[in-house]
């Protein structure tokens, strides 16, 4: 089913791409977001929470492709065996599903290279400050005592060098934040996904409100905390439609 949807996506959007992000791991479930884009424009995004990362990514990918109007119809399933009669056609389809993902990973190295280039630029400023401090010291030698007064601002000038160390620590903080859920989760995506799940289960507004009041003592999803909203989404995904 997923391979059929991917084939249709490539046919409709030759320049399209799919990107996936692991948002968080909650109660042993991987929460993954997959976005479909074409020519620099994001077409749709969907979430999925599953026990394994691969299952979560596959389900989120299926959802985002279906949101674009692609469907794995019965006719598509019947046409699937036809390529087996033409061995030359099946190898051509397989690369189409495998080739898109490699282009997604290469952008990561440029980010790393950009980070490495930023650190060298941070180091030269420190080197530029150090030559500037010996320069003001020769005038004090000529004036004798007054130079001590001019040397006092010099330590203040040393302080700009402190941000170099601070930047290094800040870089580590950014890395830690990148792995955390708060920096990556978009609550609007979670609310949108709960809409999809409520529609799948056939819940109306009153049913959803009744559940929220009974479980969390709140009448609206917008009143839920981040943790409660995520739990609500995971609960809906585990329910089967009537």
Image (spheres, grey):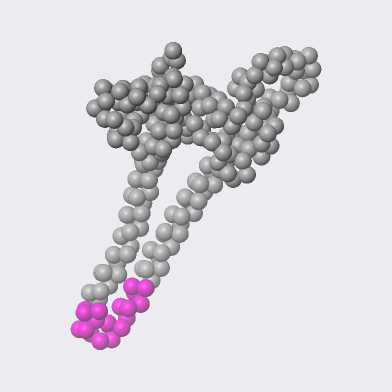
Residue at 37% from the left image edge and 26% from the top image edge: 205
Residue 217: quarter of image: top left
Please provide percent x and percent y for residue 164: 35, 58
Please provide percent x and percent y for residue 160: 32, 64
Q: Is residue 31 visible?
A: no
Residue at 53% from the left image edge and 24% from the top image edge: 58
From this view, report whether residue 235 is shown above or below residue 141. above
Residue at 54% from the left image edge and 47% from the top image edge: 110
- Apparent side of residue 4 relative to residue 88 in the rendered image (left or right): left
Nearest to the observer: residue 217 or residue 156: 217
Per the rendered image, the range of residues in magenta is 132-150
Q: Is residue 181 magenta?
A: no
Residue at 39% from the left image edge and 37% from the top image edge: 187
- Apparent side of residue 119 relative to residue 12 in the rendered image (left or right): left
Please provide percent x and percent y for residue 168: 36, 51
From this view, report whether residue 236 is shown above or below residue 124. above
Q: Is residue 236 visible?
A: yes
Residue 92: quarter of image: top right
Q: Quadrant of the C terminus?
A: top left
Please provide percent x and percent y for residue 54: 50, 23
């Amino acid at each position: 089913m997923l391979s059929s949807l991917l084939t249709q996506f490539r046919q409709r959007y030759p320049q399209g791409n799919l990107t996936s992000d692991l948002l968080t791991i909650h109660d042993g479930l991987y929460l993954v977001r997959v976005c479909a884009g074409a020519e620099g424009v994001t077409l749709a995004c969907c979430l999925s929470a599953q026990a394994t990362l691969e299952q979560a990514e596959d389900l989120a990918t299926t959802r985002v492709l279906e949101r674009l109007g692609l469907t794995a119809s019965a006719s598509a399933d019947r046409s699937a065996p036809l390529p087996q009669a033409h061995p030359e056609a099946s190898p051509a389809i397989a690369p189409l599903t495998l080739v898109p993902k490699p282009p997604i990973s290469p952008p990561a190295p440029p980010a790393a290279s950009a980070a490495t280039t930023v650190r060298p630029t941070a180091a030269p400023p420190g080197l530029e400050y150090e030559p500037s401090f010996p320069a003001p010291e020769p005038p004090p030698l000529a004036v004798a005592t007054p130079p001590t007064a001019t040397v006092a601002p010099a330590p203040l000038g040393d302080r700009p060098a402190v941000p170099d160390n601070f930047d290094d620590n800040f870089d580590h903080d950014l890395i830690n934040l990148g792995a955390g859920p708060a920096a990556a989760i978009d609550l609007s995506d979670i609310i949108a996904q709960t809409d999809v799940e409520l529609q799948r289960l056939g819940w109306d507004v009153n049913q959803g409100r009744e559940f929220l009041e009974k479980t969390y003592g709140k009448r609206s999803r917008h009143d839920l905390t981040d943790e409660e909203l995520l739990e609500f989404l995971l609960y809906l995904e585990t329910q089967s439609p009537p």
